[in-house]
Image: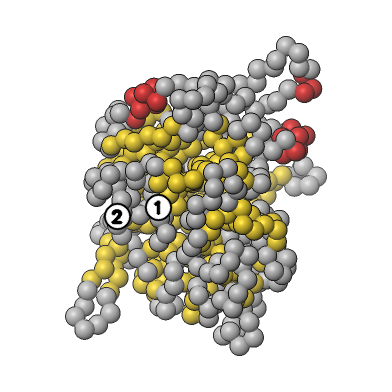
C-alpha cells in the first residue's frame, strides 16, 4: 500500500503540466527513536529494523509491507523502490534478521503468494513471477526461478490465494478455480495441479464467475461463486466437499479460522460453516455484511451496510422517486463459544449481546462504521486502525503515473487524510485511555496479525524503517 500526502511542490525548472501530484520520495530520514517515541504509549513491546543501514545517506523507500505466516516460516516481506528498481526483502518476523533481498521484475497489484519453497507475485492480467524463498544463491544473484503465464493462459477474476502446496486462481476464461501445484516447481506444473469444477464433480447448479478472493488452509479452499453458493473443495486434489447456499449475493471474502468458514450474504446473514458443509451457526445482522471478516479468540468482527430509500430525480428532472440504496452502517462485534460434548461432535453457540431480545442474537457491541480495521486482539484489548483515504488524481494523472510505475495497486491512487490506532476495551468497544488514540500518519503501512503465535502489529515508514509492536508471546518478539 502506497501512502500519498498532499504535498505538491514543483521544482523551479518544472513546467506546471509536468508536475508530479504524488508526494516526492524522501531524500533524508528521521532517526528510529523519532518513530519509537510515537509508539511508546502502547502497552506493547517494540522492535525495529532499518532497511537503509548506516552505510548510506539516502533512505530505502518502502512501497509495500506484507506479513506472512505459514509452515515454512513467519516473515515480513517489504517491497522497496531503490535507484529506479524494486527489491523484495524477507525479514524474520521474530528476531528481525534478514533472510534475503532480491531484485524483482516489477511490482504487481496482488499480494505476494507464499507456497512452500516459493513466493509468487501475480498481476491482474495473469502474468506472474516466482521467487525461491528458501535456498541461498550467491550474493547478488536473483532469486527469480520462473515467470510468464501459467498453463492455460489464466486471467484471474479475483485476487488469488495460496497455501503451503498450491496457488489458487479463479480463472475468468474458464469460470473455474485452478489449484496450481508448487510442490515440484514454481510453474504450477505437475500431477497435483487441478481444476474445479470438472465433469462429475458434484456441481448440479450453474457454475459462474468468482469475484471474491478465496480463502485457503492446508486442507480446504473456500470461495464464493456468483451463483450465490459457497464452495469448499479439497486443497490438494480439488475434490468437491460442500456447496451451501448463501441465499443471496456476498460482499465478504470468506475467512477460514478454527476449522470454520465465515462468510456473509445480502440476505442480511452471517454464516459460520463447518468444512463438511454443516452449519455451525447463522445469525441475522442489522444490515448487509460487507468487507473482510476478522476472527480471533472466537470473536467475529464485521461491517454492515444500512439499507435506505434514496431520492432520485427522474430523467426529465421534473420529479423524483425513491430507490433502494446502501450506506455504511455499523461495525459489529459478535462472539461464539464451543461446547464439547462427550462422545459426540462439539456444539457451536452464539453469545447474545442483549438477552432481552430472545428472538434474535445481538452483537456484543457496535460502533458506527468508519471503515475501521481490526489489527489484533490481546489481553482483552482490541487494536483498531481508523484510516480515511480519498481520491485526488484525475484519469490523465493516473495514466501517467502508471506508465512511470508509481501507481500499481488501487491503494496507490488514494491519498491518506488521517490514520489513527485506537486501543478499545474488547468487551465494550470503548476507548480504554485518552492517550491510546495514536496518530499514525508517519507510518505509511500498517498490518495486523491474526495468528495465535504472533499477536502483533507491523508498521513501516516510507523512509525505510520496519517496526513491530507485540504482546507477551513466547520467544524473542513473539513466535512459536
Instruction: Quarter of the image for the N terminus: give it.
Output: top right
Residue 440 in view: yes
Instruction: Give the secondary structure at mark 2.
Output: loop
Q: Please give the residue where the numbered disc 1 appears in the rendered image.
A: 74
Question: Farthest residue in the top direction?
Answer: 12
- Residue 47 location in percent, x, y? 34, 36
Instruction: Give the answer, above or below, for where 146 lies relative to 141.
Output: below
- The image shows residue 128, relative to residue 168, as above or below, that is above
Q: Residue at x 45, y 21 (%)?
A: 30
Q: In which quarter of the image is the C terminus?
A: bottom left
Image location (x, y in percent) of residue 165: 50, 68
Query: Which residue shows up at 40% across the image and 25% down it?
Result: 32
Pick whichever, 218 or 174, lies toward us: 218
Q: Is residue 61 left or right of residue 199?
A: left
Circle nearer the N terminus (1, 2): 1
Q: How dense is the environment of label 1, judged by Cα within 10 Å: few (below 14), some, or many (20 and up)?
A: some
Query: Alpha-carbon distance for marks 1 and 2?
Result: 9 Å
Q: Is residue 92 left or right of residue 114?
A: left
Residue sitting nearer the eye, 441 or 62: 62
Q: Are marks 1 and 2 in contact (CB under 8 Å)?
A: yes
Residue 80 x %, y %: 56, 37
Q: Quadrant of residue 17?
A: top right
Q: In this view, does 162 lie above or below 82?
A: below
* Direction bottom: furthest residue: 200
- The numbered dot on residue 163 is none
The image shows residue 10 at horizontal and vertical percentages of: 69, 17
Residue lying at 50% horizontally and 75% vertically, measured from the top left: 236
Amino acid at each position: 500500500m502506497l501512502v500519498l500526502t498532499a504535498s505538491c511542490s514543483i521544482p523551479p525548472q518544472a513546467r506546471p503540466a509536468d508536475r508530479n501530484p504524488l508526494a516526492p520520495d524522501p531524500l533524508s530520514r528521521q532517526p528510529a527513536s523519532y518513530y519509537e517515541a510515537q509508539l511508546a504509549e502502547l502497552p506493547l513491546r517494540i522492535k525495529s529494523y532499518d532497511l537503509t543501514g548506516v552505510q548510506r545517506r539516502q533512505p530505502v523507500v518502502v512501497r509495500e509491507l506484507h506479513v506472512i505466516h505459514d509452515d515454512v516460516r513467519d516473515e515480513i516481506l517489504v517491497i522497496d523502490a531503490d535507484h529506479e528498481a524494486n527489491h523484495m526483502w524477507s525479514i524474520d518476523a521474530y528476531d528481525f534478521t534478514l533472510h534475503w533481498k532480491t531484485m524483482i521484475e516489477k511490482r504487481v497489484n496482488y499480494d505476494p503468494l507464499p507456497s512452500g519453497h516459493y513466493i509468487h507475485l501475480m498481476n491482474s492480467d495473469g502474468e506472474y513471477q516466482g521467487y525461491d524463498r528458501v535456498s541461498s544463491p550467491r550474493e547478488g544473484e536473483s532469486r527469480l526461478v520462473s515467470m510468464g503465464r501459467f498453463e492455460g493462459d489464466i486471467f484471474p477474476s479475483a485476487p488469488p490465494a495460496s497455501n503451503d502446496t498450491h496457488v489458487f486462481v479463479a480463472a475468468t476464461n474458464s469460470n473455474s478455480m485452478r489449484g496450481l501445484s508448487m510442490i515440484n516447481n514454481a510453474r504450477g506444473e505437475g500431477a497435483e495441479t487441478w481444476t474445479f469444477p470438472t465433469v462429475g464433480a458434484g456441481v448440479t447448479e450453474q457454475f459462474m464467475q468468482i469475484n471474491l478472493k478465496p480463502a485457503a488452509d492446508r486442507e480446504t479452499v473456500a470461495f464464493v461463486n456468483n451463483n450465490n453458493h459457497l464452495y469448499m473443495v479439497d486443497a490438494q486434489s480439488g475434490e468437491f466437499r460442500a456447496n451451501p447456499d448463501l441465499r443471496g449475493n456476498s460482499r465478504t471474502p470468506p475467512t477460514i479460522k478454527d476449522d470454520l468458514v465465515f462468510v456473509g450474504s445480502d440476505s442480511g446473514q452471517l454464516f459460520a460453516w463447518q468444512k463438511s458443509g454443516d452449519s455451525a451457526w447463522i445469525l441475522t445482522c442489522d444490515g448487509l455484511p460487507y468487507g473482510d471478516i476478522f476472527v480471533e479468540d472466537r470473536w467475529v468482527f464485521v461491517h454492515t451496510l444500512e439499507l435506505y430509500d434514496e431520492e432520485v430525480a427522474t430523467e426529465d428532472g421534473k420529479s423524483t422517486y425513491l430507490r433502494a440504496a446502501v450506506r455504511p452502517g455499523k461495525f459489529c462485534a459478535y462472539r461464539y463459544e464451543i461446547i464439547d460434548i462427550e462422545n459426540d461432535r462439539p456444539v457451536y453457540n452464539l453469545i447474545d449481546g442483549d438477552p432481552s431480545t430472545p428472538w434474535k442474537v445481538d452483537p456484543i457491541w457496535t460502533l458506527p462504521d468508519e471503515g475501521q480495521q481490526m489489527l489484533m486482539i490481546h489481553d482483552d484489548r482490541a487494536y483498531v486502525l481508523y484510516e480515511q483515504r480519498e481520491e485526488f488524481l484525475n484519469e490523465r494523472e493516473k495514466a501517467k503515473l502508471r506508465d512511470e510505475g508509481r501507481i500499481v495497486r488501487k491503494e496507490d491512487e488514494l491519498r491518506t487524510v488521517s490514520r489513527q490506532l485506537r486501543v478499545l476495551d474488547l468487551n465494550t468497544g470503548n476507548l480504554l485511555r485518552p492517550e491510546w488514540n495514536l496518530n499514525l500518519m508517519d507510518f505509511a503501512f500498517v498490518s495486523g496479525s491474526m495468528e495465535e503465535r504472533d499477536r502483533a502489529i507491523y508498521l513501516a515508514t516510507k523512509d525505510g524503517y520496519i517496526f513491530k509492536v507485540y504482546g507477551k508471546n513466547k520467544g524473542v518478539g513473539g513466535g512459536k
